[in-house]
Image (cartoon, rainbow, N blue to C red):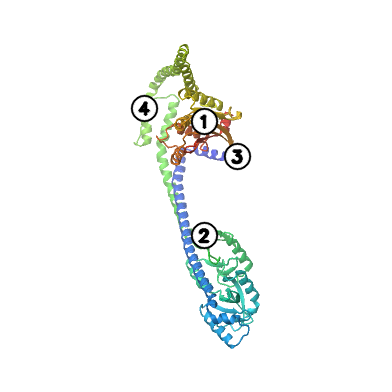
Amino acid sequence: MVSYILSIPRRLWLFLANLPMERKLIVVFIFVLSLPITYVSYLSSRSTFNSVLQSSTKSAGQMAGNASDTIDRYIADLKRYTALPLYNTDVQFYLEQQNTDWEKNTSMSMFLSYLIHTKEEMTAVYLVDKYGYVFYDRAPGINELFPSERMAQWRSLTEEAGVAPVVQGRHTLRVNSGEHREVFSVMRTVSSVSMLKPIGMIVFDIDIKLFKGIADPVNAVTQGNTIIVDEHGGLVYGGISAESAGSAHADSPDREQQDIALLLEKTGAPEGHFQIRLEEQDYLAVYTVSQKTGWTTMVTIPLERILTPVQKTRNTLILTTLAIVAIALVVATFISHALTKPLKSLVRLMKQVQHGNLDVWLSPKYNDEIGMIGSHFNRMIIRVKDLIQEVSLTEKRKQKADMRALQNQINPHFIYNTLESIRMLAESSEDPRVAELTYLLGLQMRYGIVRSEEMVTVRHELDHVRNYLNLLHIRFPDKFRLQMNVPEAFLPLPLLKLVFQPVVENAVFHGLEAKEGPGTLLITAWSEDGKTVFCVEDDGVGMDGETLRLLNSNLLNSTDSEKFGIGLRNVNERLRLHYGSACGLQVFSEPGRGTRVIIRIDTLADTRDTE
């Protein structure tokens, strides 16, 4: 089944390749015209969608932020008002007075009357004295309140908050026996200024309709629905759908709360936006979390409202694309027939040439490319006989070129034989240093030039490094010390030729030569993430951070730089070309502490190639 599916593209290609040229041109013209138009239409539609979505997101984000700031300022005012009993000496006195007389009632009523008129949305204000007696004032239309039903909850919230004001989210307030109102509350423990001990409580009940004046402008601009959720995830105002946005209770409160929980799961940041699907409808949600209250102000906009203009534009583009493709089909048919007619004549003449008839001639009517093909065809027929004669001459020239290539291969052997003769003369003259130098130089040249194969083993590379350092020891006696801690299992592995020697040469002349006293060169190897890693490390002078950064950048980007030469870059490029971009060189260095060059290769790739 898999092989059949993989063969489908090949079958389609063979079907297209076997079509007559006229039909191929028609297909090509259609694709050349329809694909760009379709792609441009898609990009245009996508761009319009993104633009509209970004605009809606930005607008909703600004409106949600402004609404959240308005709520923060309002609640901040209420929290400040809860501190007013601290500055009223009469209130302080009467809150600690156990008896309740006319003066106490009058003073408390005047103070509460002042507080109830500070905010239009204020439903009720309560003062509870030290002995649990409650004084309150209420908005018009409310004749009776039942504070005793809420006393335990007030005490729990204020005791938990200490002397700080606390906000209670949306809850139901019973008034006038059978009526209910939706409010949120701000309350605080009132402390004695002199003794700094609790002497009562103050509570504000605010009508939840306060948020309607904040949310309606946001909904009008964004065409969405604003919801406000307290720090505990409870709905303070609004709803996700338009039907529940302005109501105190949604038709399905449990479902509404589940949707709010899903929305809150995606609000990890202080502000942001996301898309979500709720009740078989996609929404764009933009939110802001207040840093002061912990309340979340969120605008949910049905994506359908945002995408309606985009869909109209998309439909127009689709109709336009179909019309252009239809016109292109007619034009492509006409043009392809006109273009392929001369080609058909040319094919007919070529068939005659195939059967040995060279007395053919094509008369081009136009000076276009097809006419040029006809002219060149005529010239080709004229030169066929000359070409047959040239074949014999070409064969003779090829034999001479092969002889020259053989001679060029023999020339390097002359150089090695000459070096060997110099070494023998040095030994006969009892000059061991010259003899050894000549011998090592011959080994270096034989390894780098004579070995024609590209791949060697790690063992060969390390032997080449030893010979190279033995050559340098003649020039710099006791200057360098070589240590090789390469496990035996790595030595037979295949490796590109001349990988270690340029790295070692770089370490010697740029790190160890400038160091005072002898230096150590260490070569180690290990396996890491399926790769074989070699490390060439020296304890030389190292390099500064900027030079190191430029060197690694040069290796990573394979850029030409005269500053670092070509040795390391040549090795790095060969490794990356052979093993892939994940392999190559990486340099670590510290001034005065030496340099480490990490060499990563993929030995599995060479194993697969060998198989």
Q: Choose the circle earlier in sequence order: 1 or 4.
A: 4
Ranked by sequence position, the earlier of labels 1 and 3 is 3
Q: Amino acid at mark 1?
A: Thr
| CA–CA distance in space, label 3 to label 4 | 47 Å
Left or right of residue 476, residue 3 in this image? right
The residue indicated by pointer 2 is 272
For the residues labelled 2 and 1, say whether their Cβ atoms are less than 8 Å apart: no
Residue situated in front as seen by the camera: 489 or 157: 157
* Residue at the (48%, 57%) spot, across then down: 49
Looking at the image, residue 403 sits to the left or right of residue 492; the answer is: left
- Name the residue tied to disc 3: 4
Q: On the picture, is 198 further left or further right than 480?
A: right
- The mark nearer the N terminus, 3 or 4, is 3
**Local secondary structure at mark 2:** strand
> Farthest left residue?
367
Measured in 3D between alpha carbons, the distance from the residue under mark 2 to the one under mark 3, in whole angstroms, is 48 Å
Front-most of 352 and 423?
Answer: 423
Mark 3 falls on what kind of element? helix
Q: Quadrant of residue 267?
A: bottom right
Question: Closer to the N terminus: mark 4 or mark 2?
Answer: 2
Spatial CA distance of label 4 from label 2 is 73 Å
Mark 4 highlights which residue?
Answer: 379
539, 498: nearer the viewer: 539
How much space separates mark 2 and mark 1, taking CA atoms?
A: 57 Å
Which disc is residue 520 wearing? 1
